Image (tube, rainbow, N blue to C red):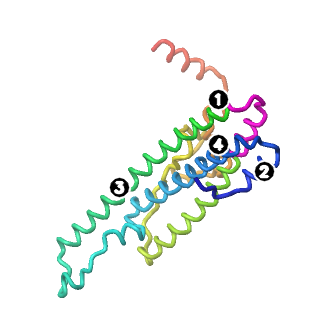
Amino acid sequence: MRLINIAPLNYLSNLGLPRSSIGLARQFLSFGEKLKVTEQKLCFMKKCKATKIFPAFILNNSNLNTDSLFPNHLPLDFSVLLHKIRILSLNQCIKQLYTDINCLKQHICDTKHQLHLMFSNQWFFHEILSVFETNNLNVKRDYKEHLQNKFYWLLQKYYPYSPPPLTTIVDPSTPASRVTVIDCNPEEPLNVTEAELDILSLGPKFALPRKVDESLIKEVEVNLTE
């Protein structure tokens, strides 16, 4: 599998990575890159579905010469059928991306295990993991920006005057987590930066603790009783 960015492999090679492990390290890095690209493609396709936008390849795959088939006008039933075909094609593409992501995660797990067994000097193994994570973040950032630009271009093309409200799409590369917001009025906009949300998404242990007072003690006692 071809690497998007060859620099990480060159870095490992310059560190003295054994020649016998170069091929497996390349494969490991390429699986990581492919996973990040596929995850961002999934986000893009789900955004398209939420806003009822069809990417160019969906339109091209379902294009018909309607002018020759219906020289006078396009029947409403045919338009509805064509729209349903495109929706089905979009759903099938999303389903396939989920399958691809699961396969890539399994390949990464298997390759990581092989690398772990290959090295008697675990320093090389941990260095490969570090390079793997850094490279994945860079690939995700670049491809996410590319697809965001593409999506906004499509959005302006489909809705030049009144773009639809955007629905928040959960990034499949981000693990499910709970975010606790304290002392927040639901009627007011949430004044939390993206960096602060990243910290809160790490879980409850990173949230601000409640003050231990009489009401909290009573609440704990009630929960224990229940």
Residues in magenta, as a range = 118-133
Q: Earlier in the sequence, mark 4 or mark 2?
A: 2
The disc at residue 24 is: 4
- In the image, is residue 52 above or below residue 214? below
Which residue does the numbered mark 2 point to in the structure image?
Answer: 11
| Element at label 1 | loop
Q: Earlier in the sequence, mark 4 or mark 3?
A: 4
Q: Badges 4 and 3: C-beta atoms under 8 Å apart?
A: no
Quadrant in the picture for the C terminus: top left
Q: Earlier in the sequence, mark 2 or mark 3?
A: 2
The residue shown at (65%, 22%) is: 213
Q: Position of residue 214 (x, y in %)?
A: 62, 20
Which label sits in the foreground, 4 or 3?
Answer: 4
Q: Position of residue 141 (x, y in %)?
A: 64, 57
Which residue does the numbered mark 1 point to in the structure image?
Answer: 210
Gap in Å between the C-alphas at discs 4 and 3?
Answer: 34 Å
Is disc 4 surrounded by few (<14), some (14 to 19) or many (20+) residues within 10 Å? some
